[in-house]
Amino acid sequence: MSINCGDNQSAQPQLRKLRAYAFDPSVSLVVDTVEINNLVYNVRWEDDLAPGPIGEYLEVIDYDPTVDIFWEPVDLDDRYILAEQGLSPSESNPKFHQQMVYAVAMVTIQNFEKALGREILWASRLLDGGDEYESYVGKLRIYPHALREANAYYSPLKKALLFGYFPARPANKAHQLPGSTVFTCLSHDIIAHEVTHAVLDGLRRNFNLPTNPDVLAFHEAFADMVALFQHFSYPDVLRHQIARTKGNLAEQNMLGELAQQFGIAIGRYGSLRDAIGSVNKETGKWEPKHPDPTTYQNTKQPHARGSIFVAAVFEAFLTVYKGRIKDLLRIASGGSGILPKGEIHPDLVNRMATEASKTASHLLNICIRAVDYCPPVDITFGDYLRAMITADCDIVEDDPHNYRLALINSFRRRGIFPEGIKTLGVEILNYPRPELSGRFEELFGIIVKYLRDFKERASYLSDPGRTKGEEFYQQGGGTVAYGDQELSTREKIYNLSRYYMSRLHGRLKQKFANTTEFEELTGVLFDNPEENSFEVMDLRIVNRVGPDGDQINQIVFNLVQRVSVIWNDDAQEWQFTGRSTKGSMKAIGGCTLIFDLDTLALKYAIKKSLLDPEKLAEGIRVPNKRYFDEQRNFEMVDLPHSFSELGRYFHNAANPDIGEPFSLLHSSTPDQNV
Amino acid sequence: MCDQSPNAVTEVIVRMYKLGTGDCFALKFLDEEDSVFTMLIDCGFWSAGRTYAQARKYISDLKAFLGNEVDLLIVTHEHEDHVRGFQAGKKLFTENFTAKRVWMGWTEEDGDPVVEEWKKDYGQKKRALAAAAMHLRKVVGTSAFEKQYKGSRHESQILGMRKGFSDELLRFSELHIGDDPEEFLSFSLDEYVNSLKGMAVVKNEIPKLESIRCRKPGELIDGDTELGLPGIRIYVLGPPMDYAAVKQEHGEEGESYEHNEDLSDFEFYSGAVMKAADDPQADGLATSAAPPFDTAFEDKPRSKIRSGYRKKENAWRTIDHDWLFSGGALALRMNSLTNNLSLALAIEFKESGKVLLFPGDAEFGSWKSWQRLSWTIDDKTVTANDLLNRAVFYKVAHHLSHNGTAKSVGLDQMTNPDLVAMATLDYDVISSGWTSTMPNKALLQQLLEQTKGRTMIMNEEGLYIDPKEKTKPWSERIREFRNKMSLEEKADFEDRLDDADDGLFIEYRVKGF
């Protein structure tokens, strides 16, 4: 983006301000929350925003197939609309619906880009492999009125979000007018949730392959968490709630209560209500729930399991927030801790809301960044905890507000431990730097230089002021345009990274084939890469500036390998079978490699090992028994019950490659909206 | 028989006819060796894998067993796997056959305004389900549908999955409306009431001595004074009277964890899908089918958005048909609602207190509602919990599916050491989608533990603990459990069981005291 600060005449605005609901329309019907439901969203200015809206990242297509009607698209560049900060919130105007999905989806994308320090890419479309195996997807499609059901989902096949609408239920009279329509595309949280599914699919395609009870739960929980913290990052929403609590500041339960109200308002994400706390029937007061470490062991249904995770992160949020406002409370109460009766001073409300919003933004950043530090497949909550700690240690040297400790404690309280780790501590959870032999240091040095080359070319692309990038890019076989249509920067980056990934694949094979050290490092089979093929995926630049100005200059990519294994009952061991045979199980493993471009060294290798790491250290190459045992056990015992009833009766419908996995998860959500 | 005063019933022969997945139970109540009363509970089966001609073989045998009449005929609920036999064997049931009494659940009470209101709404949804199933079947076969997946990786599986989905939807629709949806749609909405032909045969054609009694939960029928069934009491447990319970299909946390939607959620879907399927009745639902906005907002005829959407290279992103698949959720909702309308009965031996439990296909909401019931007998309070504690025979609800048998308010309470169970599951005659949910592993395991292996499944063949690998058949596990019984127990069980491989039924004699 080029911003010319010197010349006010021609400067393009940085932001487009758009009005929309902070929650969803039902909140406006409740008197004491009506005033906080209208929010102005700050959306990055897009110069070529077409009616739809259709921009660089999104295309809102308002086609309703259930009645075969195209609704007229909103033109956000219309000067009257611009002057009014967008159309005013209205349930009966489809153009406002289009504006709201666009605004909230863009804000979500911006949050990801800010945290990741790079442009996000949608997952590519997988082709049948005639000429190409995949193709670039520039814009996520949004269909705001696509279904007539209490459901909304991300379709990995169509790279589209489908939102439904349905009649408000009679039981909901207090929050919804009887006979009215509930539009899922008018809920901030549903939009943020669905966009997050799509972003996560672009970051880690294999995170929807269920190989353990956490995988599907993670996709859901992560999406809920982004929606929740995004919400808490708007100080206006918090200010109102904080002001209402009056003298009762010490407990600070209103934020938990507020989090749950989100759950109620949107119906489908009611999981939060159970996970965080509940209203004590005797006292009529909301109380946080005391976590039970056995719940994690015993809960397998993805939404219920996911809510444990959301509750853990939310508790960390409350802990940090309480710490951050201690001084404010001391000042306000003259050190007594007891505030005078009556309303809280508006200045104090403002300061507290700012602290809460900051805490939420920081946690949102930590959560998003962690994705780069996750193994490429078979994610568990424990892996993710390690990823959060490692990512945060990488960018923030000291942690005065104790975010990391707060996270570790709340995970511990819920019995979530990473594999092989018995005591939780920052030093233990932070992934160690791999120890390499001299020869490997050297070999990786060559790889890193190659990666640095990629980064330079990509960075030039992002900055159109420097023409060198184009040359670099074209030298690398990059297409600049199709016909007379100039490619977007993101598409060029996509092309460039594919080009580099294919080269990288060749180099890795050439340099590391048949080296036990590489197998130990990554856990993938590398004795015969022609036979045991592997993929290089998700080559990405990690470019971040921490709060203290610390910079990170890294490159990350993943190795993924698919194998077939069979259990040999006589030998009581797993065996690799080469290709799948009768009775064999397909398994997937791999490794996330993170390189530091400043020190030109491999910094982390975070793996799901297909080879038994302990045996490998003794020089014996055998399948990783524990890994395969767990996967088999999961497939046999828990997986059939992980899907909703719909997924069970219409069995293949839940298959992530061919069905609509997210639709089926969603329609199974326990609906507590009655 | 009423005018006699025989001794109390000592034993009940329970025959599960092997018609296929579906219920057909003939009961003979004996005083020593003399039959004093007969009962028939349901007569249905899935049509896949079973012809009507085959079915008649079973029904003829059943008729002979009952002696051309039955003292009490019970139809638990209106699903084909519980009533199709009355259609297949219509002649057998209407000629030279009498049902002295017929019982159904209170939701079959014609003329009751609450029931009528419910039926109208429910009938519309059945219609919508039929329309959705037929329309989707048509759509998935079109080239327009196939085009959207052209060139995608796994193209053939993607299409295959959707065709399978549409087949399954058709089968769910069949379960509710019979196997001729087009004929169903040719009726007007008002004619819905006897949509299943088997049900109509029972209501209108089987000769009866008394008019049909529609039973309500909490009722208690004294066998001696009301039925001529000496020494027996019958408790009516379900269907629950309030819709909230009917709608609750699954348990709460720790029970099982699933959705709970209202049929009204599908109001808009129903209207639109009937219109899309050109259902002549769609006009009656014009409001539900209406667009959500004022049509003044419609886009211009030749707009950029329209042409962009219809561009050939964008075909893979179109969503013209995705919405039809919501029919799957509607189907499951209908299925659970109907299951919860099951007439659920506990048959008690007065003297010993032993209970035979016939819950139909009741799901969690119904099981839970029983907990609120109580009866006073000889100044003593009897609760559903007591009845479950004393159950010595359990007809497993809904073919061993996870939602058929409640856990904490169901199986956990069936603690009687003499408990035996019968389950109507047969992989040779079933809808393919059902095989992924039946049998539920945890449920069957618990049943085997509590019955010590005395769980009789209609057809054990094809049932595996590891359905993918197929290395551990359930039949083996069942044998293991049975081998753990004491010699005396085992001998007694085998003595009371008649389960010939080529037989038409599995029979078990339940001891009354």
Image (tube, coloured by chain):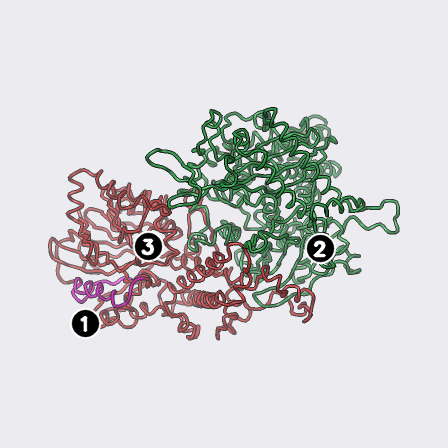
**What's the magenta region?**
B49-75
State whether discs 2 and 1 lie on one chain.
no
Side of B320 where A230 appears, left or right: right
Q: Which mark is residue B96?
A: 1
| Of the pair B322 and A81, the residue shown nearer to us | B322
Side of B357 where A309 appears, left or right: right
Question: Is B70 colored magenta in this rendering?
Answer: yes
> What crowding class fits label 2: few (fewer than 14 Cα within 10 Å), some (14-19), or many (20 or more)?
many
Q: Position of residue A348 (x, y in %)?
A: 73, 36
Identify the residue under disc 2.
A55
Identify the residue under disc 3.
B218
Side of B238 where B40 appears, left or right: left
Eye-nearest disc, 2 or 3: 2
Q: CA distance from mark 2 to mark 1?
A: 76 Å
What is the display colour for chain A? green
Eye-nearest disc, 2 or 1: 2
| Of the pair B380 and B213, the residue shown nearer to us | B213
Q: Residue furthest left?
A: B33
Question: Is A210 colored magenta in this rendering?
Answer: no
Q: Are marks 3 and 1 in contact (CB under 8 Å)?
A: no
Q: Are marks 2 and 3 in contact (CB under 8 Å)?
A: no
